[in-house]
Every structure is written in structure tokens, then in C-alpha cells.
Amino acid sequence: MTLNTAEIDAFRDAWHEAEGDDFASRATRRSLEAFAFGHPELTPVVFELTNRAQSELELHLDGETVHHHEANAESFAQLVRGIADATKEVAKHIIGHKRRASTLRIVAPTPGSVRVVLKAATPQEAAGRTAQHTRTPSVDSTSLDTVAVLLSRAQGEGAKPDDDVLSGLAADLPQKAHAGLRRAAKAIDAQDWDIDGELRSTHGFQRVHVGPLGAKALLRVLDEHQESSTSTTLSGAIDGTRRSIGALWFAPDGQAAIEAAVPSPDLMERAVQHDAANQRVRAEFDVLTIVGKGANPRRRQVYTLRRLDPLPDDPTLI
């Protein structure tokens, strides 16, 4: 039987009461994990509790160059280093630091195929019990989410020569993050890897899939450059979101609908909530003019969401 909200909250409270390192607390947590095993709706809850709100990205490598659960070591190292470097550069950009060591951790690969799990390190906490609801994703956790979404978008729209959302997501990242992404994409393309995995975060579990087609698409947009940037504010309704690929569809009043990149998990969460509530919003976008590479490059306008504010239900009050 599916648990209701009150029962899930009671499960959280029981876990909070057993966060100590003594024998009784550890035994209680094992008992709670055993109980959760029979209730799939508790899977993301247990993940959030055990990982203290930090994300992890599991990747499963497959393809013609993967044999008997083995893959090229150098290319595998480039893949992991590329993701780690890109995540670090995004984190540095968010907090405005010029230097910062990577805090990503590798979890022991699981048997079966070539698998690896990258997770954001758990931040140090002061002595004493910390209520779970006060824990939030670290900057490294948020940055790992950003990189994973970009990889998924690259594969999802890899067949399109001009993917505005992918261009917008890539353009929003610091230039130093592009080097890591380029390194990872080249490794995927060179080894013809088909990578399937999962991003686990406080926003739920999302599939991550990227192969040679997505890697080529990512390399293509990383070669684009931004010619100009303006901003615009539009009123209208959200016409759908895709958290896994960082996309939002927006129907402005009296204008054609647009697809926009949503560069942060928190902004995406607000978009999802407004969409679910069928709430009219005022949306602020950056409008980038992106120029591709080649002899006859095409100029495109790319929308990137920056802010969302709810509007009154009665249009006469706007």
C-alpha cells in the first residue's frame, strides 16, 4: 500500500531521531531502510536522508569498445576527469572563486558492466544532530546536476543541427567548464560509448543518457560563440517543462511559443511548481545571439530563463 504524506513525514522524523553513531541509532536506521525496501515511494527519501541532500551521478558504459566489463582506461579517465573539471568550474563560477579544489568522490564501481558513480562530498557539519530539513545541496552538488542535465540534453536533441536549448545551457556555463565537457565528449565519441545512467538528487531520480550522437552535438555547441546578449520580460503561461534536459516551453501573451533553457535546478523547480498550478507568470529571459562555426555560420536567437514571478489570477489586475 502506498504511504501518504503524513506517513512519509513520520518516516523522516524517525530517521532524524536516529542520526547518531551509537549502536541503537545504527540499528534503527537499518530497520528503517528495510521497511523502505518494500515501499518504492520511500526510495528518493532514503537517498536524500543518507546522502544529506547531496547529488550523485551513476553512469553505465556500453558499446562496441566495451568488452567483458572492460573499457579503455585512458578514455575512461578522460571521461571522469572531464565531468569532474566541468563540475568544479561551474562551482567556482557560482561562488565567485578563482581557485577551488574538486570535491567530487568516486564510489566503488558496481559489478555487471563498466559503471562509475560520482557524488558530491557531504559537507562537514557541526557536532550534534542537524535537522534534515536544514540541509541543502552544496555548490558542488548543484554543479553536478547542471553538468548531468547538459549531457542528457545533448543526447536528446543530438539529431538537431541547431538546438537552441543545448546552446543556451552551454553558453550559460563558464568558459573553463567547456574544456572539461569537451574532454568528456571526445572520450565518448572516440570510444563509441553508449552511456546510460541516473542522476539522483533532492529533486528526484532522472535518467541520464548520452552516446556518440550526443557527444558530437555537445562538441558542436561548444564551438559556438556568443555575439550579443539582451534581456526581455514576457508575461504568459508555462506550457510544459522537462527537468531532465533543462527545458521550458513558454506561451507569451499574443506571441508564438518559445522553448528556453533553464540553467539551474532551483529555477527549474519554480517553473515546475508554477506549471503544475496553471499559474500565469512574468518571465525574464536573456536573449543570446549565437553564431555557429563554419564558412557560412548561422545566427540564432537563444532564450535562457533568468527569473519567474507569479502574476495575479485576474488579468485586469496585471
Image: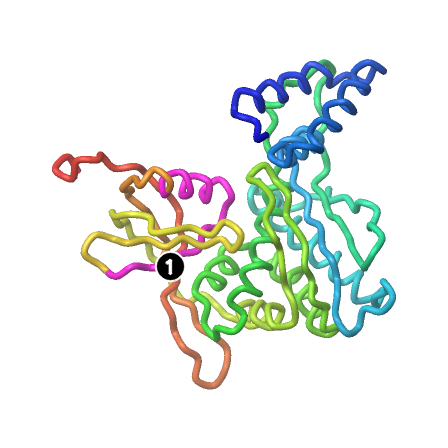
Q: Nearer the viewer, residue 86 or 147?
A: 147
Q: Nearer the viewer, residue 239 or 154?
A: 239
Residue type pointed to by label 1? Glu
Q: Quadrant of residue 176?
A: bottom right
Place of residue 10 in the rendered image (x, y in percent of width and height, measured from the top left): 60, 18
Residue that protrudes farthest toward the left in the picture: 316
Magenta-colored stretch includes residue 267? yes
150 relative to 180 in the view: left or right? left
187 relative to 167 in the view: left or right? right
Instruction: Report which residue position mark 1 lands on.
Output: 259
Q: Quadrant of residue 77?
A: bottom right
Label 1 crowd bin: few (<14), some (14–19), many (20+), radius 10 Å: some
Place of residue 154 in the rendered image (x, y in percent of width and height, measured from the top left): 56, 64
Residue that protrudes farthest toward the bottom in the picture: 295
Residue at left offset 79%, top offset 47%: 106
Which image quarter is the C terminus in?
top left
Q: Nearer the viewer, residue 65 or 127?
A: 65
- Specify the segment rendered in magenta: 256-275
Residue at left offset 25%, top offset 48%: 236
